[in-house]
Image (cartoon, rainbow, N blue to C red):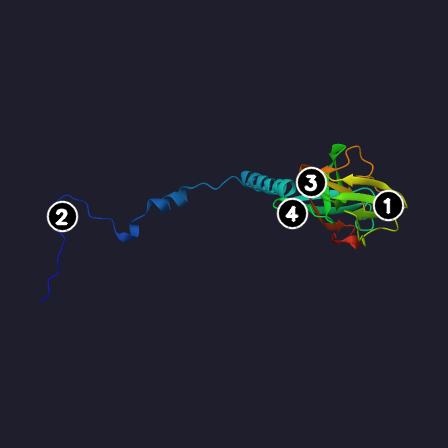
Amino acid sequence: MSEELETVRPEGTPAAAPEAEKTTEGGKDKKNKKKMNPILEWVLYIAIALGAALFIVNVLIINSYVPSGSMETTIMTGSRMLGLRTSYWFADPQRGDIIVFKYPDDPKQNFVKRVIGVPGDVVEIIDGVTYVNGEELEEPYLNGTPKARDYGPYVVPEKCYFVMGDNRNNSHDSRFWTNTYVPRDYVLGKALFCYWPINRIGVIR
């Protein structure tokens, strides 16, 4: 016959609370926690959203408006476009890239043009035809035939770029600036995507 063992406690000692009545401190904390003020929640969400937007605009992309026709028909007058700042974090602009940069004669302004000469290149325009290092440059992107004029030769310095617009007859570019070349640290990013007007939406090439 089995015997039930009984725990003996000293006289006067209160009995343990039933399991069902036990509560944990964590449970009490959860019940006692006050909800955040709804207004403060909205302020927090808005602050996070603004911080994310500022990070994207100032670190990752460039949002630009193109007021002139210097890059037509690649980028039309009145277009809005996005540039990617990260494109040149680990690489340098290449000949043919369309870049967004600070205007060398007035760094408060941003311009967009195509890279024609990279450091060490010799660029010359003869009768409207562009030559780089003595070889004619193929330019299928040009808007019409450039006027038969001569410019250069230009020897592109280190860490600088020679740029021109695709609308060669209507572009204020390296040919005419006081500070002919775009310094490397003035390059903001690579033109990537046109999002306005609707009929011009697409990748910029």
Where does label 1 land, which residue?
A: 126
Give the labeled residue for mark 3.
187
Report the Cα–Cα distance between label 1 and label 2: 110 Å
Q: Residue at x 45, y 40 (%)?
A: 34
Tell me: 172 left or right of 83: right
- How far apart are the two marked residues, 2 and 4, measured between alpha carbons? 77 Å
Cα distance, mark 3 to mark 1? 28 Å
Q: Give me the disc on residue 36.
A: none
* Residue 69 sits in quarter: top right
- List the residue tagged with mark 2: 9
Name which of mark 1 and mark 2 comes first in the sequence. Answer: 2
The furthest residue to the front? 134
User: How crowded is the residue under tag 2: few (<14 C-alpha within 10 Å), some, or many (20+)?
Assistant: few
Tag 2: amino acid: Arg
Label 4, on which residue? 87
Q: From the viewer's perspective, is 51 left or right of 62?
A: left
Relative image position of residue 181 (x, y in whole percent): 75, 37
Quadrant showing the N terminus: bottom left
Which badge, 4 or 3, is on the more N-terminal residue? 4
* Mark 4 vs 1, N-terminal side: 4
